[in-house]
Image: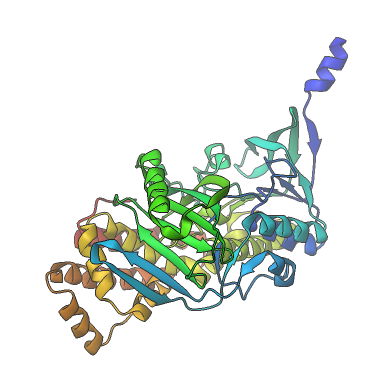
Amino acid sequence: MSTQEQSAATTPKTQSPDAVVVGAGTAGCYAAATIARAGYEVVILERKDEEEAGHIACGDALKGADAFPEAIPKSKLEPAFTNTDVDHGRFEIPQEDTVLEIPVPGELAVIDRWEYGRRIIDGAEDRGVEFRYDTVVQNVRQNDDGRVTGVEAIRKGDPVTYEADIVIDAAGSLSVLQDHVDFSDSTFDTNVDYSHFCSAYREIVEVEEPVEWDDALVFKPTERAAGYLWYFPRTDTEINAGLGFQMTEEPMQLVDDLKRDLENRPEFEGAEVEDKLGAALPTRRPYDSAVHPGYMAIGDAAGHVNPTTGGGIAGAAYGGKYAAERAIEALETGEFGEDVLWEYNQKVMDHFGARYAALDVYNILSTAVDVDDLMSLLAAMPGDKLAEALYSGSTDIGLKLKLEALVKSRGHWGTIWNLYKTKRRADELLSHYENYPTSPEGLAGWQDRRDDLMEKVYETTGAEPKY
């Protein structure tokens, strides 16, 4: 090869779409489809090859299955909904030798996540989105003012530069893009640590006989305090069996907990494992701000996951939509600063972010209480109120139910009092998040007040500071 040929082979190719989205998951596909629907050129960069794209470790449970943004209609996704008869959670509490049947509000489904992944990709392609598979982003470009102007990637071994007016980070938990952006002059939340995330592992297991709980999501605490097991029925014989655990724990020990539990459940005798996969996901409050000039983070890359259940599909879809709406406004006006993008933050907090921040208070509490006491307390609480607490971030238990819970949980009243005080702290935090600032200028003052409220959370729970 001549010197000229060698130089041509190593010189990065440059492409210049209007918007670049990194990651072909739910958030990325909905963001890209929304922008493309408005007539702009959008490219999704995906590190996996075309066959593996959409194959993501997930519990497969989808809350909010009745509503999706219009850019990729629900009808496109419905063939991936393998079980729409699920209507409640089944909480197994071995410490109390009991099972709680807890209703789940709203429409619920269990899905084939890989099929769902293919369908959201097809839906985005239908809107005109271009996909670049086998593409690993390695760096982010910024101009002298700090605005993000594109990304540098390797595609099938060749360097490629994508210049764009808007870059949307849908690259998942602990996104590598955020390691390369200088956020020093913006509001983008950099108070992010690996301890705010958990690891998840799941197996798709085919059983010989239909399970009795094919209308339920089954949860069970692990033998260690750090996580929980789940059994989610895709069908009455195909089960998503998995566990989530904090990244501070030894993963193989917890995977052994899952294997041991599978071996001891008679319904899994003779079962065959079809697929194994692991991933990381946030168990934290949403990012205070996920915008920077020319750049927005969405989905797992912005903490858009229910921190108590790990559910993130619906939030990712709507987060992608809200970010795309501001991207369209920026493209139409030629203004790409935080002021233009800010409404994305507001819509996220209004839709689900405030609720998720309040729910994170209960995660914090769980690090400071005795697990057996907590399980005993859960066993004494009414199921509908537990469901309300899990999904709304707040609940109100009437006097009669309070008295019944007190009687049932004799010996654990200290934990009840702690939970009651924690609930008040969560309510205060929820109220504060509902007054999220309307502009970047208001963020610092809002954060100061939020941090004061978090100090009260730590004082009440006795937990070590999380943020």
Residue at 47%, 49% in the rendered image = 200
Image-quadrant location for residue 307? bottom left
Is residue 51 toward the left or the right of residue 212 in the image? right
- From this viewpoint, which residue is outermost toward the left? 411
In the rendered view of the protein, which quadrant contains the N terminus? top right
Q: Which sits in the foreground, 242 or 116?
A: 242
Is residue 11 toward the left or the right of residue 238 in the image? right
Q: Residue 402 in the image: x percent, y percent?
A: 22, 83
Residue at 62%, 76% in the rendered image = 66
Q: Is residue 181 visible to the viewer in this orientation of the structure?
A: no
Q: Residue 212 in the image: x percent, y percent?
A: 48, 70
Is residue 309 depicted above or below 4 in this figure?
below
Is residue 168 toward the left or the right of residue 289 in the image? right
Is residue 332 depicted above or below 168 in this figure?
below
- From this viewpoint, which residue is outermost toward the bottom? 400
Residue at 41%, 50% in the rendered image = 263
Q: Which sits in the foreground, 12 or 95?
A: 95
Q: Residue 360 in the image: x percent, y percent?
A: 37, 61
Residue at 24%, 66% in the rendered image = 96
